[in-house]
Image: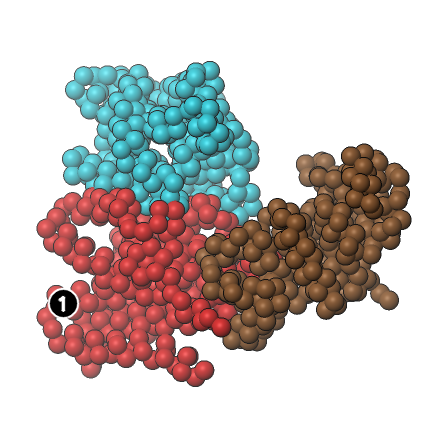
Chain colours: A cyan, B brown, C red
Amino acid sequence: MLWLQVLVNGLAVGGLYACIAVGFSLVWGVLNIINILHGSLIVLGGYLAFFAHQYWGINPFLFAPLAGAVMFAGGVALQYCVINHVMARPFLITLLLTFGLNLFLDNSMLALFSADYRKVLLNPAPGVFDLGSIVVPADRIYATLVGLVLISALALLLRFTQFGRAIIAVRMDRDAAALLGVNVRWTYAVAFGLGVFMAGSAGALLSAIFPISPVASAGYLSKAFVICVIGGLGSIPGAVIGGFALGVIESFGALLLGPEHALTLAFVLLIALLAVRPSGLLGRQGFA
Amino acid sequence: MTALLELKGVTKRFRGLEALSDINLSLKSGEIVGLIGPNGAGKTTLVNVITGVHTADAGSITFNGAPIAHMRRDRIARLGVARTFQVVQPFPAMTVLENVTAAALFGGGAASIAEARDAAAHHLAFCGLTDQAGKPAANLTLAGRKRLELAKSLALRPKLLMLDEVNAGLNPAEVDAALELITRIAAQGATILLIEHLMKVVTRTARRLVVLHHGKLIADGPVASVLSDETVVEAYLGRRYAERMAGAGI
Amino acid sequence: MMLRIALPLALPFAIVAVAFVLLSQTDAYIIRLATTFGMYAALALAWNIIGGIAGYPSFATAAFFGLGAYVTAVAQNLGAPLLVGVGLAGAGAALFAGLLGSAILHLRGKYFAIASLVIAEVLRELTNSWTSVTGGGMGINLPLAKTTLLTQPQLYLAAMLFLAAAATSASMLIDRSRLGVALRCIAQNEDAAQIIGVDTRMAKTWAFVISSLFIGLVGGVYASWVTYIDPTDVYDGAMSVKPILMALLGGVGSVFGPVLGAFAYLLLEELLWRNLLEFHAGILGLLVVLLVLFLPGGLSQIRGVGLVSLPKIWRRAP
């Protein structure tokens, strides 16, 4: 029964983890950028949800898309005005740029909100679903469900809207897409914005589960890395599978080695996986 | 006379598709052999398997008595297997001389950089590139880059030299110059495998012809007899090819 | 021939010896600054061996730096003298790089960058949780080194400058050696390098090991200098990025570029730090952004951009 409980614990956060990684994966896949800023964006989404709950009493699980929408605008602007200037440069340059932006955002949040850990305390507390021999924490289930809904919405957007098709076209072949009349600059900006949307939403979702602090941003970025490498970079199904896989791995890692080693285990796994199979378990697939 | 290169039952699959199936091929020292076949026949794959870019799924490859089927490519190169690429592969930011020096230093077994540079200068002269020695490789014309590929290959002091479409994209005068160069290389004693589309090149330089089609070796013998083989000409090179060859008076 | 080997060996050390004599009697601030410069220059030069000359963008500097710092700290707490402790730091980092290299050096581009980025995180977590040896998150104190001839600040000034000189010599020697030629071939076209017979695996591993050796040594000296380290300090991700910035500032792939870059970076850092203590990381971030956006030179090439372009040392025309 213990094993089943541990498995369920892992699966319960799977959708949330997928949500953490899918934006990172989208930006990697379409813009070919490693977005170091991603972890800080998640934390920022968490703060938005925290203050929305504190001042207006909005439930963070419902607030998630709104947090994403607010940040989407900022993401589009950031990409269009700053990141776009280095899109043609070697990836070391784009990586350094997002690293610099990350330092700036992290330090700004540190100055504004301090390093104290905060958490949305829901009233009444969500409690647990009691399934007899095992219990499932309700907050994680809510987060995972909302996360999966948002991911599905993103997948539908990419597949069935003209804009989504443009993003996929740019991912497949940038020059051909440009010849077909796709505005590549604008497409990049919106794709980045969508990545930021998912980061912000993920942050809001986890604000009621995990403590929020600027110093936590590197941890979320690391999770996004691991998830993407497990599932294969640049695909939505990959991020979902990787999210659930990381949830389960962490859960069992915490059981077997102690909770403080859960992430280390995931990292060691990541290096091993990179060494053996760099394209991830699902390999490279088209986005959508 | 023992074979320099011996392939036995070499098979290579890509995602279930057989790019090479059961290839048996033996090259003797000092031979010039033409390898022909339509696009997608597996010619470049064969070269890639011999040079260790791909690993054969089955079969054995022996070079100069040593099994090389599972050897790393740099070791194969140091044994004396050189190749040129269909798409040229220079070190773009290095000069022409530096490109060839690097080849002489690692594949050619030069004892020092100075010695490698001397050898490189010699190979550049041989390939008619002395004037261009100081230019960055990226600034060469296509014909120049193909010559650079040849010079780099020669700097490896190869026992076996595989020339993959060295003449593709060159104009007739450049092809003639390249052919003359190949003939001079052959005169130095290296075994040459000439992968070609242009019949003129193959028939002028090679005595023996090997034909690949759909990954299978379908003919192997003296040029005249392979070319007069109706099935080879019609079924595997296509009717238009046959007519062109007839028109060229072959 | 002798001169070609002897000169790169002797010259950096001679310059550093003169600098030490001139600087050692100045006030504490200047000595601290010069020590930091030696550290930065050594780190930038070390990163440049794998990241610049070989073109493998390593983000593992913090990992080897932290590892070196902790190896020294633990060794000195067990009674090892300073020199032995620092030596072990270098050896430990080099050995770890050799093992790690066989796992991640076959990865190219972004995948290598990610794998190298993660190493520091793993080591930090391990250091954090291995409390009995490392002191965990509380950090660890180092004993004061026994010195007779020099004061403490003078000792570490000498040590860091010495490492900078050694890293310069190593870079110059690599640049003129077979290894240097192999690494440049790898940086420009790894497939073509293999085809001309370069043992790319061996060359990359050597570059990674030599680079990490210096980073480990610097980490060891740093730990002894500051006498207290903790995991967040020595495995700081910024430590991986600063040497890259310095190399970019000065010229990636060149021998002296990283030294100039380290100097330029230190000046910028000093100007900003003193005025903006609270927000210095944010300013460093802005600085990175501005540098990346407005770095002079070719837009698609990073090699040879910066203050010093590609050296032409082994490029002697016939």
Q: Is residue C16 above or below residue B5?
A: below
Amino acid type at circle 1 is Ile
Q: Is residue B33 above or below residue A191?
A: below
Judge from the rendering whether residue C140 lies leftward or rightward of residue B59; answer left or right: left
The picture places residue C292, in percent across and down from the top left corner, at 29, 46
Answer few, some or many: residues within 10 Å of disc 1's Cα (few below 14, many 20 plus, some between 14 and 19). few
Judge from the rendering whether residue C203 lies leftward or rightward of residue A143; answer left or right: right
Q: Residue at x 10, y 70 (%)?
A: C27
Q: Residue furthest bottom?
A: C2
Q: Residue at x 71, y 36 (%)?
A: B16
Please tell me how many numbered marks the rendered image carries: 1
Judge from the rendering whether residue B216 lies leftward or rightward of residue A211; answer left or right: right
Q: Nearer the viewer, residue A177 or A117?
A: A177
Chain that bears disc 1: C
Q: Is residue C232 above or below residue B215?
A: below
The local secondary structure at tag 1 comes to helix
The picture places residue C164, in percent across and down from the top left corner, at 30, 69
Residue C79 appears in the rendering: no
Determine which residue is flagged by label 1.
Answer: C30
Q: Residue at x 23, y 57 (%)?
A: C265
Judge from the rendering whether residue C212 lies leftward or rightward of residue B144; answer left or right: left
Q: Nearer the viewer, residue C62 or B223?
A: B223
The picture places residue B195, in percent across and down from the top left corner, at 72, 50
Residue A90 appears in the rendering: yes
Q: Nearer the viewer, residue A254 or A217?
A: A217
Determine the image quadrant of residue A66: top left
The picture places residue B133, in percent across and down from the top left corner, at 50, 65
Q: Residue at x 50, y 34 (%)?
A: A231
Determine the image quadrant of residue C88: bottom left
